Every structure is written in structure tokens, then in C-alpha cells.
Image: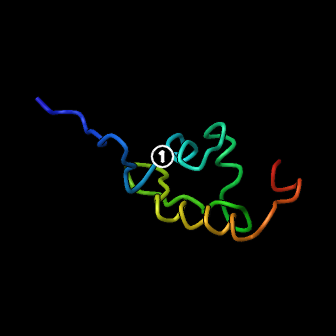
Amino acid sequence: MSRPARIPSGAWPAQLDATLAAGFVGESSAEAFKRKCGDGKPYPAPRRISGVGDRWRTKDLEAAIDRLHDAGPLDGADLI
């Protein structure tokens, strides 16, 4: 019998699906998060992993959050 994978309490996996990534960065939903991913947007594009799907690395998301805080306030277009 296989055992389900577990994430230790208080820890984030090294790579996240869209739902977990949205929670990690504080977005309201996976859809809202994905709209803000890609070139010229606050968050990086996902890495497509064969047989798994789109994944975001936590360290890439942490770097994006650091850039957002260093960049100063966002204008209204960044919030849409």
C-alpha cells in the first residue's frame, strides 16, 4: 500500500501548483495568481513539467515578492 505524500507542518514544498502558489504569495485564487504571472508581471511564469503540469518554485516566488517590496508601491494597472 502506498502512503500519501506529506508536507511537514510549517514548511512549503520546493515547487507548488497554482493553488498552493496563490496561497504562498497571498493571492485570492489560483486564477488571480495566474493572471499576474509571466514576462512583465509581478510573478514568474510557471515551469511546465512533463507528466506533472505547471509548477512554480518557491525560491522564484520569494524573489518576486522581494522585488515587489523593493520596487515601491504598485499602480492601479498592477492590481487588475
- Label 1: how many Cα within 10 Å (few below 14, some 14–19, many 20+): some
Image position of 41 (left or right of 7): right
Three-letter residue code for mark 1: Asp
Residue at figure coordinates x 61%, y 66% from the top left? 66
- Give percent across and percent down for residue 50: 39, 55
Q: Residue furthest left?
A: 1
54 sits to left or right of 1:
right
- Which residue is pictured at 75% across the width and 70% down the height? 71
What is the total number of numbered labels drawn onto the structure image? 1
Task: Residue at 49%, 42% (x, y): give it.
Answer: 20
Residue 10: give x, y in percent of width and height: 37, 44
Q: Secondary structure at mark 1?
A: loop
Q: Residue furthest right?
A: 76
Where 12 sits versus 3, above or below? below
What residue is pinned by disc 1?
Answer: 17
Question: Quarter holding the N terminus?
Answer: top left
Quarter assignment of residue 23: top right
Of the pair 73 and 42, the residue shown nearer to us: 73
Percent x, y for residue 22? Answer: 58, 44
